[in-house]
């Protein structure tokens, strides 16, 4: 199907929140029927059910063509517009300083540019190995490179302002990343001072299957090289965030125990990386929560032995009990099995002032839950750079029933115009959300 850049009339969708107070405790869980723009949830560690409180399910709505006239729902005061359709599995979105929108089509192994002037999409690069992460370097108004994280390495292309085609062959920056396994996405981001490159690599499995065992001396030697709680065996170099120079030198483990950080972003005004993390499956409908968190250097976040603090995964048989006091509790817990992917901080002033500094996260949607959840974009309110602990539905309406859906959000990016751009890979569309005033 050919790609279309879509110019349609703006549609304002007034939506009243379903609840004025945050949903907490058991009310914070649940499926898609309770979703609507403005609904706020606060999931706390003490709210978690015990393992296997429900059976583990393997269910997911079927993907159907977008019904005629179907549109996402957004809060009052915002407008949602279809920007492009006909893309092949669009995933990561990144806005260039000149306003062009870079779209990573991972399955097709290519990157396209949606021009800021509304022109036809342009092929920037192709022949890539499951590209996912993309970043401009150096940070700021005049980048010289476009970095791309493939499933097995990091490369960069020469770039000049306004360029819509790669300026030359890719240069290899990080020669080898772990390949294969369940998680192939590799996101990347730069610190705002341009000195550090962060790379996220997901686990090869759900709970570290096939890692084998090490004795205490072997563990101590391994962790001295790879960090507290670092996985080994077929999980070596995975379930972690790594850091290197922009040239790929001095690559080392930054943080461990992150099952799959599919969304990596650096907070504005700081050099702190944040992760949107897919947690494990098979412990029940409401366990464990996915999460978003600031990632601290040297921190361990639990996988595969613990989850959300010192909660042991019963399938590990008590292994690594020595780590129970070393697990960092993440900042914001999300509905379990929501599958968070893209993440972006709002650093513009086109939205109302209270959105400044907030984070947006795309939830790709569940496959391991009886009632579907996710399939939306949520907002994480921040105050003085710190999350408030809850999150709000911002963009919903992609699910039609327990059996059918037409959209799975993946990428989020803030454009030069201050709008929020969202990709979804079920029907290959890109959307723009802007303030109506």
Image: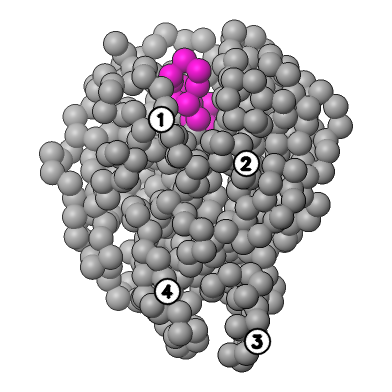
Quote the CA–CA distance across marks 2 and 4: 28 Å
- Label 2 vs label 4, nearer the camera: 2
Inspect the magenta stretch and tell me whether residue 419 lies in it: yes
- Where the N terminus falls, by quadrant? top right
Q: In the image shown, does 353 or 433 lie closer to the viewer?
A: 353
How many C-alpha atoms fall within 10 Å of the one at disc 1: few (<14), some, or many (≥20)?
Answer: many
The residues colored magenta run 413-432
Inspect the magenta stretch and tell me whether residue 269 lies in it: no
- Label 3 vs label 2, nearer the camera: 2
Quote the CA–CA distance across marks 1 and 2: 22 Å
**N-terminal label among 4 and 1:** 4
Q: In percent of the image, x 23 and y 65: which residue is there?
A: 47
Q: In percent of the image, x 43 and y 51: which residue is there?
A: 294
Judged from the image, the secondary structure of the residue bearing numbered disc 3 is helix
Judged from the image, the secondary structure of the residue bearing numbered disc 1 is loop
Quote the CA–CA distance across marks 3 and 2: 33 Å
**Residue bearing mark 4:** 326
Q: In percent of the image, x 40 and y 79: which residue is there?
A: 324
Judged from the image, the secondary structure of the residue bearing numbered disc 4 is helix
Judged from the image, the secondary structure of the residue bearing numbered disc 2 is loop
Q: In the image shown, does 64 or 376 lie closer to the viewer?
A: 376
**Residue bearing mark 3:** 218
Please provide percent x and percent y for residue 343.
47, 40
Which picture quadrant has residue 369? Answer: bottom left
Quote the CA–CA distance across marks 4 and 1: 32 Å
- Label 1 vs label 2, nearer the camera: 2
**Residue bearing mark 1:** 346
Residue 195 - label: 2
């Amino acid at each position: 199907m050919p790609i279309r850049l879509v110019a349609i009339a703006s549609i304002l969708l007034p939506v009243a929140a379903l609840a004025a107070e945050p949903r907490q405790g058991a009310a914070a869980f649940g499926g898609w029927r309770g979703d609507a723009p403005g609904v706020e949830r606060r999931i706390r560690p003490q709210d978690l059910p015990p393992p296997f409180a429900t059976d583990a399910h393997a269910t997911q709505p079927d993907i159907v063509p977008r019904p005629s006239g179907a549109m996402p729902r957004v809060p009052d005061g915002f407008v949602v517009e279809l920007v492009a359709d006909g893309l092949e599995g669009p995933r990561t979105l990144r806005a260039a300083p000149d306003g062009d929108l870079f779209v990573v089509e991972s399955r097709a192994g290519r990157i396209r540019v949606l021009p800021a002037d509304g022109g036809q999409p342009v092929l920037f690069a192709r022949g890539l190995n499951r590209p996912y992460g993309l970043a401009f370097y150096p940070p700021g108004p005049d980048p010289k490179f476009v970095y791309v994280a493939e499933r097995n390495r990091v490369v960069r292309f020469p770039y000049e302002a306004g360029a819509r085609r790669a300026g030359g062959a890719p240069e290899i920056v990080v020669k080898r990343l772990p390949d294969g396994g369940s998680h192939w996405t590799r996101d990347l981001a730069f610190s705002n001072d341009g000195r550090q490159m962060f790379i996220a690599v997901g686990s090869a499995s759900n709970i570290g299957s096939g890692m084998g065992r090490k004795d205490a001396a072997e563990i101590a030697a391994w962790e001295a090289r790879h960090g507290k709680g670092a996985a080994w065996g077929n999980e070596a170099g995975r379930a972690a965030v790594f850091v290197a120079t922009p040239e790929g030198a001095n690559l080392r483990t930054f943080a461990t125990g992150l099952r799959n950080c599919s969304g990596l972003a650096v907070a504005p005004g700081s050099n702190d990386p944040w992760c949107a993390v897919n947690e494990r499956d098979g412990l029940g409908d409401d366990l464990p929560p996915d999460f978003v968190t600031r990632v601290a250097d040297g921190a361990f976040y639990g996988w595969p032995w613990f989850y959300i603090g010192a909660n042991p995964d019963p399938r590990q048989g008590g292994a690594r009990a020595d780590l129970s006091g070393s697990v960092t509790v993440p900042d914001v817990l999300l509905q379990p099995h929501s599958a968070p992917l893209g993440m972006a901080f709002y650093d513009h002033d086109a939205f109302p002032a209270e959105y400044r500094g907030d984070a947006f996260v795309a939830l790709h949607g569940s496959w391991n839950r009886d009632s579907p959840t996710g399939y939306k974009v949520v907002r994480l309110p921040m105050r003085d750079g710190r999350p408030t602990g809850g999150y709000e539905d911002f963009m919903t309406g992609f699910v039609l029933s327990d059996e059918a859906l037409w959209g799975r959000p993946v990428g989020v990016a803030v454009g030069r115009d201050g709008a929020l751009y969202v990709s979804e890979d079920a029907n290959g569309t890109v959307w723009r959300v802007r303030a109506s005033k």
